[in-house]
Image (cartoon, helix red, strand yellow):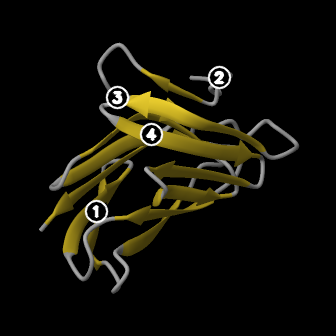
C-alpha cells in the first residue's frame, strides 16, 4: 500500500486510514470530521499519533501508516505498515481483557491498565502489511 499523503482520510468502506512514516518533520492535521467526531493526527518518521475529540486513540513509535482502522466497544482492527518494527499503543476500556491477534497469530489475552492503554509490538521489517485484531474477551 502507501503512505497517506493527506495524513488522514475516510475510505470508501467507511474505515479510517492515517499516518505517513516517510515525513522527516512532524506534520499534523486537526479538525478532521468522521462519524460525528473530530480527529487530530500527528505523524512523521519517529511517531504517529491519533486523537479523537482530544482523547488518545493510537500511537506508534516509530511512525507508521494505518489502513482500514475500525473501532467500536468490542473490537479494534486495522492494517499497519512501516519501515521498522513498531510499538503500538491503543486506548481501550480500562482494566479489561482483550484477545489480541497480530498477523494472523494469536498473541494471547492482554489486560489494559487503569488508563485503558494497551501496547503491542508489530514486526514490520520483513513484511509490507500486518493485520491487527483486538477483541474484548
Q: Are marks 3 and 4 in contact (CB under 8 Å)?
A: no
Dot 1 surroundings within 10 Å: few (below 14), some, or many (20 or more)? many
Q: Is residue 24 left or right of residue 19?
A: right
Inter-mark Cα distance, 2 to 3: 15 Å
Q: Are marks 3 and 1 in contact (CB under 8 Å)?
A: no
Total count of labels: 4
Q: Position of residue 48 (x, y in %)?
A: 64, 50
Give the labeled residue for mark 2.
Answer: 6
Dot 2 surroundings within 10 Å: few (below 14), some, or many (20 or more)? few
Please report the residue visible at 69 percent of the width from the left and 45 percent of the height from the top.
43
Give the labeled residue for mark 3.
Answer: 15
Inter-mark Cα distance, 4 to 2: 16 Å
Residue at the left extreme, as displayed: 137
Asked if residue 15 is positioned above or below residue 134 in the image, the reply reads above
Q: Earlier in the sequence, mark 4 or mark 1?
A: 4
SS state under label 3: loop
Q: Nearer the viewer's eye, disc 1 or disc 2? A: 2
Viewer-nearest residue: 7 or 131? 7
Give the labeled residue for mark 4.
Answer: 38
Amino acid at each position: 500500500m502507501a503512505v497517506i499523503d493527506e495524513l488522514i482520510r475516510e475510505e470508501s468502506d467507511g474505515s479510517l486510514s492515517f499516518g505517513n512514516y516517510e515525513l522527516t518533520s512532524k506534520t499534523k492535521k486537526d479538525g478532521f470530521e468522521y462519524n460525528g467526531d473530530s480527529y487530530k493526527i500527528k505523524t512523521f518518521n519517529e511517531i504517529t499519533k491519533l486523537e479523537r475529540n482530544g482523547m488518545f486513540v493510537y500511537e506508534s513509535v516509530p511512525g507508521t501508516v494505518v489502513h482500514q482502522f475500525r473501532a467500536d466497544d468490542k473490537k479494534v482492527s486495522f492494517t499497519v505498515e512501516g519501515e521498522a518494527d513498531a510499538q503500538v499503543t491503543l486506548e481501550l476500556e480500562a482494566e479489561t481483557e482483550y484477545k489480541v491477534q497480530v498477523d494472523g497469530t494469536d498473541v494471547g489475552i492482554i489486560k489494559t491498565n487503569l488508563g485503558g492503554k494497551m501496547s503491542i509490538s508489530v514486526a514490520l521489517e520483513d513484511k509490507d502489511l500486518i493485520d491487527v485484531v483486538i477483541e474484548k474477551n
